[in-house]
Amino acid sequence: MRLLRLTLENYRRFEGEHQIEFAPNEDRNVTIIQAQNGAGKTGILMALLFGLFGVVKYQEFNIETDTQDILINRNVLKRESTAHARVVVEFTNAGKHYEIERTIQGSYIKGRVSQKADDIKSIMKVDGLMKSENTPEINDIMNGMIGENIRGFLFFDGVKYMNLFKQDHKRYKKDLQEIIERMLNIDDLDKTIRIIELLESDLSKRTASKRHESEKAKLLSQQRELQEDKKEHKKAIEDLESDIAQNEKRKQDIEFRLEEMQEYADILEHLRTEREKRNDKEKQLGELQTDITRLASSALKKLLVEKVGKDIRPTLEDKISSSETLDKALVKSILDTEECICGNRVEEDEKRELESVLSEIETGRQADPDYIYLLKKMYDDMHWNPDDPARFADLYVEWENAMDELNSVIFSIQEYEAQLPDEIQELSDERAKESENLGSVSQRIASMEKELKDREEKLDDTEESLKKNEQELDTINEQIALETGKQNEYGFYKSTKKNLRELREDYLRQAQEEISIKANEFFQQLLSEHDKKAFERLKINEDYRIEAYDVNNSEVFQQLSAGQKHLAAMAFTMGLTAVATQAKSQFEFPLVMDTPFSNLDTPNRRRLITLMPQVVNQWTLTPMDTELSDNEIDAFQETGSVGAIYQLIKYGPTSRIIKHESLDYLKGGG
């Protein structure tokens, strides 16, 4: 299968029609879709799922209900009241050209946005000819081509699959078991076993002794209660897992941001200290300015009264008596003239001038540096004496020193900021806060992990009780079968059920071995030459735990670095899918990787960039703009494997898809 083109119309952040044409051939099989944070890269992945499979509930992205995520662009909905989103995916498979178009309707009524998730219009064309307009039929065709059990693995989420490598954690081992069983269609065997159990149970409905009927009724009642308890525990576990996953994602985001800033840790620490000094100095200056203003206030009022006409002094004195400060403009007017403000003018002029004076007094404001300088000029040039001249002089000297210190601190801050990239400057103020957040999130995770462990233990106890209950029911059913002469039929069902369960276990063990072999092949391709000498192989053991072995056959999983674990997660994903699709030499489906370089250092990033185009059929990656530096771009250019380059740019609540002809357009942050 090879993706050709993705067309979006009014889909999520993408208003109007947009297109992405994927890398065209085997030699240039890499498509890069760089995105700003929040620009819609996850929306691109969701669009592929929607177009290919008609999926509206996205388990891959922790969106479980149709109403959680509105696919239709909200701007269009609000403007037009009713609108649709359309996604078209074109691809080739087995020499044929496929085109699937999906359309979903929505409305905006009385401030409420809704969409008709149960009414998706679908069209499929094959080699340009209409194949079907029936959504269930199209879904069946796609599930036959790319089974529902593996489609989630077309989209590699490093965070999701790194969790599978958390050793000795029951939840993640169960997740891994469920993933493997789902991909290998174990459900078919389980359904057969359940059918046999129903046939077996039907035998016991025949006439039996009252004692056996009573015992069976009691056991069935107990079974129902235990199943309700199991259901409750599983629901609580699912809720806790969801909360933990969200907090772990938040934790990883914080760790990534802190890691981004680590290179500049010393500068950021100096910057934080200097900014604290600046805040302290600004606070000190504010207090000094307030003290100086209050000290000068009464003397200024007296001087102002002396400068107005005698006829209006009583009115002015009464008005300014309740005012704590005077406006800077008034102080400046006193400073600039030795003449009486209004003493020699006609009465109307005096009234107008008085009204102006009173108005300025009413709007008197907090002192600022210019105001303090004016006061000092009056003190020096006019021999004006405030109420406490010595105190005024001391306060002014203290204020002037504080101003010099503040300017020095500001200059120091500017010097430190000049040493930081713009994006780090934006994050620097949050460094201390993010460190606190990391501790808080870690505590929440630890608390929920403890609660989860308690729930899991209760679930284990309940499942053990159910197992015991089942054994007791088997004994009763066997006795009833004996009483009714159906022991041979019962024995057949019981042995068949046992054989199928053994077959199930054998099949899973064989699959684990095959997955381990495939995963190890990919892992060895992704490792550096140095690491290949250190790590011999990956393995999934019978307890669904991922193990890594060195050349001495010692289990060394805990010694893997975060980057090596990330590569191991990729190798496992590819190996698992290879086994499920019976792939031989390479990964036969397009692989889409979200934020592909997280947890990888520069050498591992370059190795991944070099090897992945050779390992997979088609590679589409959606890195953040901060994740695709010039180093990664140079590495891609050296491979010559990039066939399509796009950039998602935010424009307020919408985004645009920009196509580039060269990776050079993305250099220097794009």
Image (tube, rainbow, N blue to C red):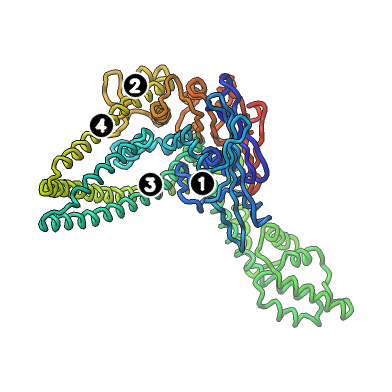
Q: Considering only vertical position in the picture, is 261 above or below 552? A: below
What residue is rendered at 82% in x and 74% in y? 353
Q: Are marks 2 and 3 in contact (CB under 8 Å)?
A: no
Q: Is residue 288 left or right of residue 372?
A: left
Location of residue 99 in the rendering, given as x and y in whole percent from the top left corner? 59, 34
Q: Is 27 on the left or on the right of 60, as rendered?
A: right
Q: Within 10 angstroms of label 4, few (less than 14), some, or many (20 or more) residues?
A: few
**Spatial CA span between label 2 and label 4:** 33 Å
> Which numbered mark, 3 or 1, is in the foreground of this view?
1
User: What is the residue that sits farthest to the front in this orientation?
Assistant: 485
Q: Residue at x 50, y 20 (%)?
A: 614
Q: Secondary structure at mark 3?
A: helix
Instruction: Give neighbour class at mark 1: few <14, some 14-19, many 20+ (Cα, 10 Å).
Output: many
Residue of label 2: 535
| Residue marked by disc 3 | 442
Q: Which mark sits nearer the N-terminus, 2 or 4?
A: 4
Question: Do the residues bearing badges 1 and 4 touch, measured as CB atoms within 8 Å?
Answer: no
Q: Name the mark on residue 56.
A: 1
Q: Amino acid at mark 1?
A: Val
Query: Which dot, 2 or 1, sits closer to the camera?
Result: 1
Residue 147: quadrant of the picture: top left
Checking the image for residue 503, the label placed there is: 4
The nearer-to-camera label among 1 and 4 is 4
Frontmost residue, 507 versus 604: 507
Disc 3 marks a residue whose amino acid type is Ser
Which of the two labelled residues, at mark 2 and mark 3, occupies the earlier sequence position? Answer: 3
Label 2 to label 3: alpha-carbon separation: 31 Å
First reached walking from the N terminus: tag 3 or tag 1: 1
Count the labels in the image. 4
Residue density around tag 3, few if under 14, some if 14–19, many if 20 or more, within 10 Å: some
Of mark 3 and mark 4, the one earlier in the sequence is 3
Q: Earlier in the sequence, mark 1 or mark 4?
A: 1
